[in-house]
Image (spheres, rainbow, N blue to C red):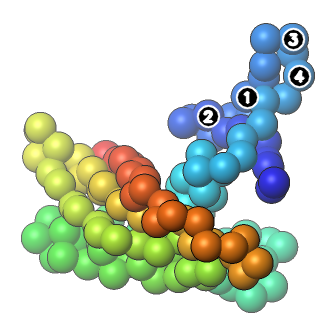
């Protein structure tokens, strides 16, 4: 089963109770990978030869609020498209925060089964909540 080092909401590597690295796997790993893709500016990662890592979410900062709310789902789909062999996006909801200044995105997705994993029952949809514009 694939795993990675766990990253906190602030972007720091996390330690376990015995000062060892905390790891993440399964659905939480998919969520972490999605968050990383959405936070990195597309084309800014030095070791990304294909230019597919990251998103253009920073473009939404330059838009007025109604246009940003309309464009954000497309920017998210574009950023997560390279993960289409791992996840299937079911729904993207863009919601204004309580103060109407922050924008919250709710992404519903299911995990795509890799070939050879057999015929498992339909996987339950997962959801990811992310504040994209403070």
C-beta proximity under 8 Å, tags 3 and 4: yes
Quick one: SS at disc 3?
Answer: loop
Circle 3 Cα neighbour tier, 10 Å, few/some/many (<14 / 14–19 / ≥20): few
Q: Which mark is residue 55?
A: none
Does the rendering let one see residue 132? Answer: no
The CA distance from mark 1 to mark 4 is: 9 Å
Pinpoint residue 34: horizontal percent, then vertical percent. 55, 60
- Work out whether mark 2 precedes mark 4 in sequence or the reverse, and give the earlier one: 2
Q: Label 2, on which residue?
A: 8
The CA distance from mark 2 to mark 3 is: 17 Å
Quick one: SS at disc 1?
Answer: loop
The CA distance from mark 3 to mark 4 is: 5 Å
- Work out whether mark 2 precedes mark 3 in sequence or the reverse, and give the earlier one: 2
Q: Label 3, on which residue?
A: 18
Q: Label 4, on which residue?
A: 20
State left or right for residue 31 relative to residue 47: left
């Amino acid at each position: 089963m694939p795993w990675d080092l766990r990253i906190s909401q602030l972007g720091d590597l996390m330690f376990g109770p015995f000062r060892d690295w905390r790891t993440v796997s399964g659905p939480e790993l998919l969520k972490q990978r999605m968050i990383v893709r959405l936070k990195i500016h597309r084309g800014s990662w030095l070791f990304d030869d294909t230019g597919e890592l990251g998103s253009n979410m920073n473009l939404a900062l330059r838009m007025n609020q109604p246009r940003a709310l309309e464009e954000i789902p497309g920017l998210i789909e574009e950023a997560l498209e390279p993960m289409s062999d791992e996840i299937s996006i079911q729904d993207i909801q863009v919601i204004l925060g309580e103060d109407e200044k922050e924008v919250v995105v709710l992404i519903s997705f299911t995990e795509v089964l890799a070939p050879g994993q057999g015929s498992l029952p339909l996987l339950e949809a997962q959801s990811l909540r992310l504040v994209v514009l403070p």
